[in-house]
Image (spheres, rainbow, N blue to C red):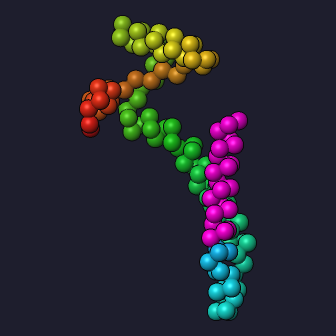
Amino acid sequence: MLRLALFLGTNLAIVALISLTFRFLGLEGLLQQNAVNLDINALILYSAIVGFAGSLISLFLSKSLAKATMRVRVIDEPRSDVERWLVSTVHSQAKNGGDREARRRHFRSPLAQRFRNGLEP
């Protein structure tokens, strides 16, 4: 529920900022002086629709793109002792942290090891 509230709040704040910017800059008066028939409210509504659609597309793609980019392999059944240790460690930490279901992922990358060890990439 908090994620939805943050999502809606952020998008509405951006639309409000666009609206206020147009009003403070006097864009509506400038358009009327140059005989441009443009409804600012319709433009703001259109920008809200496009903005919400774009952020939803980004939200839906972000998890799969992150997994593909990092070459993450989901561990459903551990195949080795290291994977069993990883699964049990993540499960116990999730349980202690109040998470009902731990999602176990594993990726092999020297970059991740460098970040974990505090080295620069």
Q: Nearer the viewer, residue 22 or 102?
A: 22
Residue 79 location, quadrant? top left
Q: Quadrant of the C terminus?
A: top left
Q: Nearer the viewer, residue 102 or 3?
A: 3
Q: Position of residue 63 (x, y in %)?
A: 51, 37
Residue sitting at x 29%, y 33%? 111
Q: Nearer the viewer, residue 8 or 102?
A: 8
Q: Is residue 56 magenta?
A: no
Q: Position of residue 6 (x, y in %)?
A: 65, 44
Q: Is residue 80 above or below residue 2?
A: above
Q: Is residue 39 left or right of residue 54?
A: right
Secondary structure, magenta segment, majority class: helix
Q: Position of residue 105 (x, y in %)?
A: 45, 24
Residue 50 location, quadrant? bottom right
The answer to whether any part of residue 119 appears in the image is: yes
Q: Is residue 63 left or right of residue 41?
A: left
Residue sitting at x 47%, y 9%? 88
Please give the range of residues in magenta.
1-21
User: Looking at the image, how many numbered discs can be counted on the residues?
Assistant: 0
Q: Is residue 21 above or below residue 96?
A: below
Residue sitting at x 66%, y 68%? 20
Q: Quadrant of the N terminus?
A: top right
Q: Position of residue 104 (x, y in %)?
A: 48, 20
